[in-house]
Image (cartoon, grey):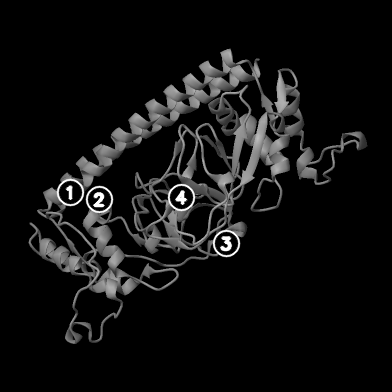
Amino acid sequence: MECFVVYKNEIEGRIDPFYYRPEFREFEKKLSKIRIVSFGQIIKSITNGFDYRKFTDEGSTYLRVSNIKPFELDLTDVKKINPSFEINKNIKLKKDDLLLTRKGTFGVALSLNKDEDFIISSEIFKIELSKEVNPKFIEIVLNSSIGKKQFNKYKIGGIMGSLSQEAVKQIKIPLPPLSIQNPIVQIMDNAYKTKKQKEFEARQLLDSINDYVLSEIGIQMPELKDQMTFVVYADDVKGKRIDSYYYQPKFEEIEKVIEKGRFKLVKVKDVLDINNRLEDIRKYEQIQYIDLASIDKDLGIIKEYKLINSSEAPSRARQKVNKGDLLLASLNGSLKSIALVNKDNNIIASTGFYIIKKSNKYNNHYLWSLFRSLIYQAILKKETTGAIMSAINRESLLNLKIPFPPLEIQNKIAEEVKRRMEKAEQLQKEAKKILEKAKKEVEKIILEG
Protein backbone atom coordinates (compact mmCIF):
# COMPACT_ATOMS: atom_id res chain seq x y z
CA MET A 1 0.00 0.00 0.00
CA GLU A 2 1.27 3.48 -0.90
CA CYS A 3 0.82 6.32 1.60
CA PHE A 4 1.55 10.03 1.18
CA VAL A 5 0.37 13.36 2.56
CA VAL A 6 -1.40 16.10 0.61
CA TYR A 7 -1.95 19.42 2.38
CA LYS A 8 -5.14 21.42 2.03
CA ASN A 9 -3.45 24.27 0.19
CA GLU A 10 -2.17 21.79 -2.45
CA ILE A 11 -5.64 20.70 -3.53
CA GLU A 12 -6.21 21.83 -7.12
CA GLY A 13 -9.86 20.95 -7.69
CA ARG A 14 -9.60 17.18 -7.98
CA ILE A 15 -9.74 15.01 -4.87
CA ASP A 16 -8.68 11.60 -6.23
CA PRO A 17 -5.40 10.50 -4.55
CA PHE A 18 -3.83 9.32 -7.81
CA TYR A 19 -3.67 12.91 -9.05
CA TYR A 20 -1.39 13.85 -6.13
CA ARG A 21 1.06 10.95 -6.25
CA PRO A 22 4.61 11.97 -5.20
CA GLU A 23 6.08 10.99 -8.58
CA PHE A 24 3.95 13.68 -10.28
CA ARG A 25 4.96 16.31 -7.76
CA GLU A 26 8.66 15.47 -8.10
CA PHE A 27 8.38 15.65 -11.88
CA GLU A 28 6.73 19.06 -11.73
CA LYS A 29 9.60 20.32 -9.56
CA LYS A 30 11.95 19.42 -12.42
CA LEU A 31 9.80 21.30 -14.91
CA SER A 32 9.69 24.38 -12.67
CA LYS A 33 13.43 24.88 -13.26
CA ILE A 34 13.01 25.55 -16.99
CA ARG A 35 10.79 27.77 -19.14
CA ILE A 36 7.38 26.15 -19.43
CA VAL A 37 3.95 27.17 -20.67
CA SER A 38 0.61 25.46 -20.32
CA PHE A 39 -0.37 23.67 -23.51
CA GLY A 40 -3.49 25.85 -23.66
CA GLN A 41 -1.30 28.94 -24.13
CA ILE A 42 0.04 27.71 -27.47
CA ILE A 43 -3.20 26.12 -28.75
CA LYS A 44 -5.16 28.22 -31.26
CA SER A 45 -7.98 25.68 -31.51
CA ILE A 46 -8.77 22.15 -30.37
CA THR A 47 -11.51 20.08 -31.99
CA ASN A 48 -12.92 16.62 -31.37
CA GLY A 49 -13.19 14.29 -34.33
CA PHE A 50 -16.29 12.68 -35.80
CA ASP A 51 -17.95 9.50 -34.50
CA TYR A 52 -19.00 7.18 -37.34
CA ARG A 53 -19.00 3.36 -37.37
CA LYS A 54 -20.50 2.42 -40.73
CA PHE A 55 -17.37 1.39 -42.60
CA THR A 56 -17.39 0.93 -46.37
CA ASP A 57 -15.05 -0.38 -49.07
CA GLU A 58 -14.78 3.06 -50.68
CA GLY A 59 -15.03 6.62 -49.43
CA SER A 60 -13.05 8.93 -47.18
CA THR A 61 -10.17 7.59 -45.10
CA TYR A 62 -11.24 7.45 -41.45
CA LEU A 63 -8.40 7.70 -38.94
CA ARG A 64 -8.76 5.87 -35.63
CA VAL A 65 -6.49 5.75 -32.58
CA SER A 66 -4.58 2.75 -33.98
CA ASN A 67 -3.57 4.79 -37.05
CA ILE A 68 -1.80 7.50 -35.04
CA LYS A 69 1.88 6.80 -34.32
CA PRO A 70 4.76 9.16 -33.43
CA PHE A 71 6.29 10.60 -36.63
CA GLU A 72 4.03 8.56 -38.93
CA LEU A 73 0.50 7.65 -39.93
CA ASP A 74 0.02 3.90 -39.83
CA LEU A 75 -2.43 3.09 -42.62
CA THR A 76 -1.98 -0.70 -42.63
CA ASP A 77 -5.45 -1.18 -41.12
CA VAL A 78 -7.32 1.93 -42.12
CA LYS A 79 -11.10 2.20 -42.52
CA LYS A 80 -13.24 4.04 -45.08
CA ILE A 81 -16.52 5.85 -44.50
CA ASN A 82 -19.01 7.37 -46.89
CA PRO A 83 -21.54 9.41 -44.88
CA SER A 84 -24.53 10.86 -46.71
CA PHE A 85 -24.14 14.28 -45.07
CA GLU A 86 -21.53 17.05 -44.99
CA ILE A 87 -18.64 16.61 -42.54
CA ASN A 88 -17.75 19.55 -40.29
CA LYS A 89 -14.97 21.50 -42.04
CA ASN A 90 -13.29 22.12 -38.69
CA ILE A 91 -11.93 18.57 -38.64
CA LYS A 92 -10.38 18.68 -42.12
CA LEU A 93 -6.65 18.16 -41.73
CA LYS A 94 -3.96 20.67 -42.70
CA LYS A 95 -0.17 20.68 -42.66
CA ASP A 96 1.20 21.27 -39.13
CA ASP A 97 -2.06 20.22 -37.45
CA LEU A 98 -1.34 18.13 -34.37
CA LEU A 99 -3.37 14.95 -33.86
CA LEU A 100 -3.65 13.68 -30.30
CA THR A 101 -5.37 10.47 -29.26
CA ARG A 102 -7.73 11.06 -26.36
CA LYS A 103 -9.19 7.62 -25.56
CA GLY A 104 -7.95 4.03 -25.35
CA THR A 105 -4.25 4.45 -26.12
CA PHE A 106 -4.44 8.10 -25.12
CA GLY A 107 -1.71 10.73 -25.39
CA VAL A 108 -0.15 9.68 -28.72
CA ALA A 109 0.71 12.76 -30.79
CA LEU A 110 1.44 13.24 -34.48
CA SER A 111 2.16 16.46 -36.39
CA LEU A 112 1.09 16.31 -40.04
CA ASN A 113 3.69 16.97 -42.73
CA LYS A 114 1.09 17.92 -45.34
CA ASP A 115 -2.60 18.53 -45.90
CA GLU A 116 -4.57 15.27 -45.72
CA ASP A 117 -8.04 14.53 -47.06
CA PHE A 118 -8.80 12.33 -44.06
CA ILE A 119 -11.48 12.35 -41.37
CA ILE A 120 -10.56 11.74 -37.73
CA SER A 121 -12.61 9.72 -35.28
CA SER A 122 -14.14 11.22 -32.15
CA GLU A 123 -11.34 9.61 -30.11
CA ILE A 124 -8.76 11.96 -31.66
CA PHE A 125 -8.24 15.69 -31.10
CA LYS A 126 -7.19 18.00 -33.95
CA ILE A 127 -5.08 20.80 -32.52
CA GLU A 128 -3.96 23.95 -34.32
CA LEU A 129 -0.88 25.48 -32.71
CA SER A 130 0.38 29.04 -32.56
CA LYS A 131 3.20 30.06 -34.89
CA GLU A 132 5.83 30.43 -32.17
CA VAL A 133 6.36 26.67 -31.92
CA ASN A 134 7.59 23.92 -34.20
CA PRO A 135 4.71 21.40 -34.29
CA LYS A 136 7.18 18.52 -34.53
CA PHE A 137 8.84 19.71 -31.33
CA ILE A 138 5.48 19.63 -29.52
CA GLU A 139 4.88 16.13 -30.91
CA ILE A 140 8.25 15.04 -29.48
CA VAL A 141 7.48 16.53 -26.06
CA LEU A 142 4.04 14.95 -25.85
CA ASN A 143 5.32 11.50 -26.86
CA SER A 144 8.23 11.68 -24.39
CA SER A 145 8.11 10.81 -20.69
CA ILE A 146 7.51 14.55 -20.12
CA GLY A 147 4.13 14.25 -21.82
CA LYS A 148 3.30 10.69 -20.77
CA LYS A 149 3.63 11.37 -17.03
CA GLN A 150 1.37 14.38 -17.30
CA PHE A 151 -1.23 12.61 -19.44
CA ASN A 152 -1.30 9.87 -16.84
CA LYS A 153 -1.89 12.46 -14.12
CA TYR A 154 -4.55 14.49 -15.93
CA LYS A 155 -6.49 11.59 -17.48
CA ILE A 156 -10.09 11.08 -16.43
CA GLY A 157 -11.84 7.76 -15.87
CA GLY A 158 -10.62 4.58 -14.22
CA ILE A 159 -9.54 1.46 -16.13
CA MET A 160 -9.97 2.96 -19.62
CA GLY A 161 -8.60 6.45 -19.07
CA SER A 162 -9.26 9.30 -21.47
CA LEU A 163 -8.35 12.96 -21.97
CA SER A 164 -10.68 15.94 -22.01
CA GLN A 165 -9.95 19.19 -23.82
CA GLU A 166 -9.52 20.95 -20.48
CA ALA A 167 -7.09 18.28 -19.25
CA VAL A 168 -4.99 18.63 -22.42
CA LYS A 169 -4.77 22.41 -21.97
CA GLN A 170 -3.25 21.91 -18.50
CA ILE A 171 -0.26 19.93 -19.76
CA LYS A 172 2.98 21.81 -19.08
CA ILE A 173 5.15 22.22 -22.17
CA PRO A 174 8.87 23.08 -21.96
CA LEU A 175 9.34 25.81 -24.55
CA PRO A 176 12.91 26.69 -25.50
CA PRO A 177 13.47 29.08 -28.42
CA LEU A 178 13.08 27.82 -31.99
CA SER A 179 16.87 27.77 -32.26
CA ILE A 180 16.77 24.81 -29.82
CA GLN A 181 13.43 23.33 -30.90
CA ASN A 182 14.55 22.84 -34.50
CA PRO A 183 17.79 20.88 -33.78
CA ILE A 184 15.81 18.62 -31.40
CA VAL A 185 13.35 17.90 -34.19
CA GLN A 186 16.28 17.06 -36.50
CA ILE A 187 17.75 14.61 -33.98
CA MET A 188 14.45 12.74 -33.70
CA ASP A 189 13.78 12.89 -37.43
CA ASN A 190 17.15 11.26 -38.14
CA ALA A 191 16.51 8.60 -35.49
CA TYR A 192 13.10 7.71 -36.94
CA LYS A 193 14.52 7.50 -40.48
CA THR A 194 17.27 5.12 -39.30
CA LYS A 195 14.69 3.12 -37.33
CA LYS A 196 12.43 2.77 -40.37
CA GLN A 197 15.34 1.66 -42.57
CA LYS A 198 16.32 -1.09 -40.14
CA GLU A 199 12.69 -2.16 -39.77
CA PHE A 200 12.40 -2.28 -43.57
CA GLU A 201 15.46 -4.55 -43.75
CA ALA A 202 13.96 -6.76 -41.02
CA ARG A 203 10.68 -6.93 -42.93
CA GLN A 204 12.49 -8.00 -46.12
CA LEU A 205 14.22 -10.79 -44.21
CA LEU A 206 10.96 -12.02 -42.70
CA ASP A 207 9.17 -11.87 -46.04
CA SER A 208 11.97 -13.89 -47.63
CA ILE A 209 11.25 -16.78 -45.22
CA ASN A 210 7.93 -17.46 -46.96
CA ASP A 211 9.52 -17.83 -50.41
CA TYR A 212 12.45 -19.83 -49.03
CA VAL A 213 10.29 -22.38 -47.19
CA LEU A 214 7.85 -22.90 -50.06
CA SER A 215 10.78 -23.32 -52.46
CA GLU A 216 12.40 -25.96 -50.21
CA ILE A 217 9.20 -28.03 -50.02
CA GLY A 218 8.44 -27.60 -53.73
CA ILE A 219 5.29 -25.50 -53.51
CA GLN A 220 4.73 -22.57 -55.85
CA MET A 221 2.49 -19.88 -54.42
CA PRO A 222 -0.53 -19.32 -56.68
CA GLU A 223 -2.10 -15.93 -57.22
CA LEU A 224 -4.86 -15.73 -54.63
CA LYS A 225 -7.94 -13.70 -55.51
CA ASP A 226 -11.42 -13.75 -54.06
CA GLN A 227 -14.14 -14.12 -56.69
CA MET A 228 -17.44 -12.29 -56.38
CA THR A 229 -19.44 -15.07 -58.08
CA PHE A 230 -18.78 -18.79 -58.50
CA VAL A 231 -20.75 -22.04 -58.70
CA VAL A 232 -20.82 -24.76 -56.04
CA TYR A 233 -22.78 -27.94 -56.73
CA ALA A 234 -25.03 -29.50 -54.12
CA ASP A 235 -23.01 -32.72 -54.03
CA ASP A 236 -19.97 -30.71 -52.98
CA VAL A 237 -21.63 -29.22 -49.91
CA LYS A 238 -23.62 -32.19 -48.64
CA GLY A 239 -22.70 -32.73 -44.98
CA LYS A 240 -20.16 -29.94 -45.14
CA ARG A 241 -20.04 -26.23 -44.36
CA ILE A 242 -22.44 -23.92 -46.17
CA ASP A 243 -20.63 -20.55 -45.84
CA SER A 244 -19.66 -19.32 -49.29
CA TYR A 245 -16.10 -18.22 -48.37
CA TYR A 246 -15.14 -21.84 -47.64
CA TYR A 247 -15.77 -22.66 -51.30
CA GLN A 248 -13.82 -19.81 -52.89
CA PRO A 249 -12.14 -21.21 -56.05
CA LYS A 250 -8.75 -19.99 -54.82
CA PHE A 251 -8.72 -22.80 -52.26
CA GLU A 252 -8.89 -25.40 -55.04
CA GLU A 253 -5.79 -23.77 -56.52
CA ILE A 254 -4.06 -23.97 -53.17
CA GLU A 255 -4.91 -27.66 -52.78
CA LYS A 256 -3.55 -28.40 -56.25
CA VAL A 257 -0.16 -26.76 -55.70
CA ILE A 258 0.23 -28.38 -52.25
CA GLU A 259 -0.53 -31.81 -53.75
CA LYS A 260 2.22 -31.22 -56.33
CA GLY A 261 4.76 -30.44 -53.63
CA ARG A 262 8.00 -32.35 -53.07
CA PHE A 263 6.89 -34.18 -49.93
CA LYS A 264 3.95 -36.32 -48.91
CA LEU A 265 1.00 -34.72 -47.18
CA VAL A 266 -0.07 -35.99 -43.78
CA LYS A 267 -2.84 -35.03 -41.40
CA VAL A 268 -1.75 -32.98 -38.40
CA LYS A 269 -3.30 -35.52 -35.99
CA ASP A 270 -1.15 -38.32 -37.43
CA VAL A 271 2.24 -36.65 -36.85
CA LEU A 272 1.99 -33.80 -34.36
CA ASP A 273 1.36 -33.77 -30.62
CA ILE A 274 -1.40 -31.18 -30.14
CA ASN A 275 -1.76 -30.93 -26.38
CA ASN A 276 -4.36 -28.61 -24.95
CA ARG A 277 -4.58 -30.08 -21.47
CA LEU A 278 -6.07 -27.54 -19.07
CA GLU A 279 -4.42 -27.13 -15.69
CA ASP A 280 -5.28 -25.69 -12.31
CA ILE A 281 -2.70 -22.90 -12.03
CA ARG A 282 -3.46 -22.16 -8.37
CA LYS A 283 -0.65 -24.52 -7.38
CA TYR A 284 1.79 -21.87 -8.64
CA GLU A 285 2.33 -18.70 -6.63
CA GLN A 286 3.22 -16.73 -9.75
CA ILE A 287 2.99 -17.48 -13.46
CA GLN A 288 4.49 -16.05 -16.63
CA TYR A 289 1.44 -15.58 -18.81
CA ILE A 290 1.24 -15.50 -22.61
CA ASP A 291 -1.89 -14.27 -24.38
CA LEU A 292 -2.54 -13.21 -27.97
CA ALA A 293 -1.34 -9.67 -27.23
CA SER A 294 2.02 -11.11 -26.09
CA ILE A 295 2.92 -12.14 -29.65
CA ASP A 296 4.67 -9.83 -32.10
CA LYS A 297 2.79 -10.80 -35.28
CA ASP A 298 5.45 -9.38 -37.61
CA LEU A 299 8.35 -11.25 -36.05
CA GLY A 300 6.45 -14.29 -34.83
CA ILE A 301 8.05 -14.07 -31.38
CA ILE A 302 6.83 -13.68 -27.83
CA LYS A 303 7.54 -10.07 -26.97
CA GLU A 304 6.29 -10.25 -23.39
CA TYR A 305 5.81 -12.81 -20.62
CA LYS A 306 3.42 -11.21 -18.13
CA LEU A 307 4.49 -11.99 -14.57
CA ILE A 308 1.32 -12.15 -12.48
CA ASN A 309 0.08 -13.80 -9.30
CA SER A 310 -1.87 -16.93 -10.14
CA SER A 311 -4.77 -15.69 -8.00
CA GLU A 312 -5.07 -12.65 -10.29
CA ALA A 313 -4.72 -14.53 -13.57
CA PRO A 314 -7.53 -14.33 -16.14
CA SER A 315 -9.77 -17.36 -16.58
CA ARG A 316 -8.15 -18.12 -19.96
CA ALA A 317 -4.75 -18.72 -18.30
CA ARG A 318 -5.03 -22.50 -18.23
CA GLN A 319 -2.38 -24.16 -20.41
CA LYS A 320 1.05 -25.13 -19.05
CA VAL A 321 3.71 -24.87 -21.77
CA ASN A 322 7.41 -25.61 -21.92
CA LYS A 323 10.43 -24.29 -23.77
CA GLY A 324 10.29 -25.33 -27.43
CA ASP A 325 6.50 -25.68 -27.60
CA LEU A 326 4.80 -23.95 -30.52
CA LEU A 327 1.84 -21.65 -29.89
CA LEU A 328 -0.71 -21.54 -32.69
CA ALA A 329 -3.46 -18.91 -32.33
CA SER A 330 -6.99 -20.10 -33.02
CA LEU A 331 -8.83 -16.79 -33.58
CA ASN A 332 -9.31 -15.49 -37.13
CA GLY A 333 -7.98 -12.02 -36.40
CA SER A 334 -4.81 -13.40 -34.80
CA LEU A 335 -3.82 -16.27 -37.12
CA LYS A 336 -0.31 -14.88 -37.52
CA SER A 337 0.20 -14.95 -33.74
CA ILE A 338 2.37 -18.04 -33.95
CA ALA A 339 5.48 -18.27 -31.79
CA LEU A 340 7.88 -20.62 -30.04
CA VAL A 341 8.16 -20.60 -26.27
CA ASN A 342 11.77 -19.73 -25.42
CA LYS A 343 11.59 -19.79 -21.61
CA ASP A 344 10.81 -22.22 -18.80
CA ASN A 345 9.53 -21.80 -15.25
CA ASN A 346 5.75 -21.73 -14.82
CA ILE A 347 4.85 -20.54 -18.32
CA ILE A 348 1.09 -20.48 -18.81
CA ALA A 349 -0.61 -19.84 -22.17
CA SER A 350 -4.09 -18.59 -22.92
CA THR A 351 -6.72 -21.02 -24.14
CA GLY A 352 -6.69 -18.90 -27.32
CA PHE A 353 -3.75 -21.05 -28.51
CA TYR A 354 -3.35 -24.61 -29.70
CA ILE A 355 -0.12 -26.04 -28.29
CA ILE A 356 2.14 -28.13 -30.53
CA LYS A 357 4.45 -29.84 -28.09
CA LYS A 358 8.19 -30.03 -28.65
CA SER A 359 9.20 -33.44 -30.03
CA ASN A 360 12.20 -35.24 -31.46
CA LYS A 361 9.94 -36.51 -34.28
CA TYR A 362 9.49 -33.10 -35.92
CA ASN A 363 10.99 -29.61 -35.81
CA ASN A 364 8.78 -26.85 -34.43
CA HIS A 365 10.85 -24.17 -36.17
CA TYR A 366 9.92 -25.79 -39.49
CA LEU A 367 6.25 -25.87 -38.44
CA TRP A 368 6.49 -22.23 -37.32
CA SER A 369 7.60 -21.20 -40.81
CA LEU A 370 5.02 -23.44 -42.50
CA PHE A 371 2.01 -22.17 -40.58
CA ARG A 372 3.15 -18.53 -40.99
CA SER A 373 3.61 -18.92 -44.77
CA LEU A 374 1.12 -17.07 -46.96
CA ILE A 375 -0.32 -20.29 -48.31
CA TYR A 376 -1.05 -21.82 -44.89
CA GLN A 377 -2.29 -18.52 -43.48
CA ALA A 378 -4.91 -18.66 -46.26
CA ILE A 379 -5.77 -22.26 -45.36
CA LEU A 380 -6.06 -21.47 -41.66
CA LYS A 381 -8.38 -18.57 -42.46
CA LYS A 382 -10.51 -20.87 -44.60
CA GLU A 383 -10.91 -23.29 -41.72
CA THR A 384 -12.18 -20.69 -39.23
CA THR A 385 -15.85 -20.87 -38.30
CA GLY A 386 -18.21 -18.64 -36.33
CA ALA A 387 -19.79 -15.26 -36.89
CA ILE A 388 -18.64 -12.72 -34.30
CA MET A 389 -15.48 -14.48 -33.02
CA SER A 390 -14.51 -16.91 -35.78
CA ALA A 391 -11.85 -19.46 -34.89
CA ILE A 392 -10.38 -22.79 -35.97
CA ASN A 393 -11.95 -25.69 -34.13
CA ARG A 394 -9.80 -28.58 -32.95
CA GLU A 395 -11.19 -31.11 -35.44
CA SER A 396 -10.41 -28.86 -38.42
CA LEU A 397 -6.84 -28.33 -37.23
CA LEU A 398 -6.24 -32.03 -36.59
CA ASN A 399 -7.48 -32.95 -40.07
CA LEU A 400 -5.41 -30.28 -41.80
CA LYS A 401 -2.93 -31.74 -44.31
CA ILE A 402 0.65 -30.47 -44.20
CA PRO A 403 3.86 -31.31 -46.11
CA PHE A 404 6.00 -33.47 -43.83
CA PRO A 405 9.61 -33.79 -45.05
CA PRO A 406 12.07 -36.18 -43.35
CA LEU A 407 13.40 -34.77 -40.08
CA GLU A 408 16.84 -33.94 -41.50
CA ILE A 409 15.23 -31.74 -44.15
CA GLN A 410 12.97 -30.10 -41.55
CA ASN A 411 16.11 -29.38 -39.50
CA LYS A 412 17.89 -27.88 -42.52
CA ILE A 413 14.95 -25.59 -43.27
CA ALA A 414 14.64 -24.70 -39.58
CA GLU A 415 18.28 -23.63 -39.28
CA GLU A 416 18.00 -21.20 -42.19
CA VAL A 417 14.68 -19.90 -40.87
CA LYS A 418 16.23 -19.33 -37.42
CA ARG A 419 19.18 -17.49 -38.97
CA ARG A 420 16.88 -15.08 -40.81
CA MET A 421 14.62 -14.67 -37.77
CA GLU A 422 17.55 -13.86 -35.50
CA LYS A 423 18.93 -11.32 -37.98
CA ALA A 424 15.51 -9.67 -38.32
CA GLU A 425 15.09 -9.59 -34.55
CA GLN A 426 18.54 -8.03 -34.17
CA LEU A 427 17.65 -5.31 -36.68
CA GLN A 428 14.45 -4.62 -34.74
CA LYS A 429 16.40 -4.33 -31.50
CA GLU A 430 18.93 -1.97 -33.12
CA ALA A 431 16.07 0.18 -34.44
CA LYS A 432 14.50 0.39 -30.99
CA LYS A 433 17.85 1.15 -29.34
CA ILE A 434 18.58 4.01 -31.76
CA LEU A 435 15.19 5.57 -31.06
CA GLU A 436 15.46 5.18 -27.28
CA LYS A 437 18.93 6.77 -27.32
CA ALA A 438 17.61 9.74 -29.31
CA LYS A 439 14.66 10.14 -26.91
CA LYS A 440 16.96 10.25 -23.90
CA GLU A 441 19.23 12.75 -25.64
CA VAL A 442 16.44 15.19 -26.49
CA GLU A 443 14.76 14.85 -23.08
CA LYS A 444 18.06 15.74 -21.47
CA ILE A 445 18.40 18.80 -23.72
CA ILE A 446 14.83 19.88 -22.94
CA LEU A 447 14.95 19.36 -19.17
CA GLU A 448 18.32 21.04 -18.79
CA GLY A 449 16.91 24.11 -20.50
The mark that comes first in sequence, 3 or 1, is 1
User: What is the quadrant of the N terminus in the image?
Assistant: top right
Tell which of 378 and 110 is nearer to you: 110
Closer to the chain start, of discs 3 and 4, is 3
- Crowdedness near tag 4: few (<14), some (14–19) or many (≥20) residues, C-alpha within 10 Å: some
Distance in Å between CA atoms under marks 2 and 1: 7 Å
Which x, y percent locates residue 238? 23, 86
Q: 341 above or below 395?
A: above
- The residue under label 4 is 294
Residue position for label 2: 369
Question: Residue 26, image x and y in percent?
Answer: 75, 28
Helix, strand or loop status at disc 3: helix
Q: First in sequence: mark 1 or mark 4?
A: 1
Using residue 227 as the reference point, say whether residue 135 is left or right of it. right
Q: Amino acid at mark 2?
A: Ser
Mark 3 to mark 1: distance in Å?
A: 41 Å
- Of tags 3 and 4, the one toward the viewer is 4
Answer left or right for 359 relative to 102: left
Sequence order check, earlier mark of 4 and 2 = 4
Evaluate if marks 1 and 4 touch, with contact meaning CB atoms under 8 Å apart: no
| Label 3 crowd (10 A; few <14 / some 14-19 / many >=20) | some
**Up-down: is 244 above or below 449?**
below
Question: In the figure, 434 relative to 310: above or below?
Answer: above
Q: Which mark is residue 213?
A: 1
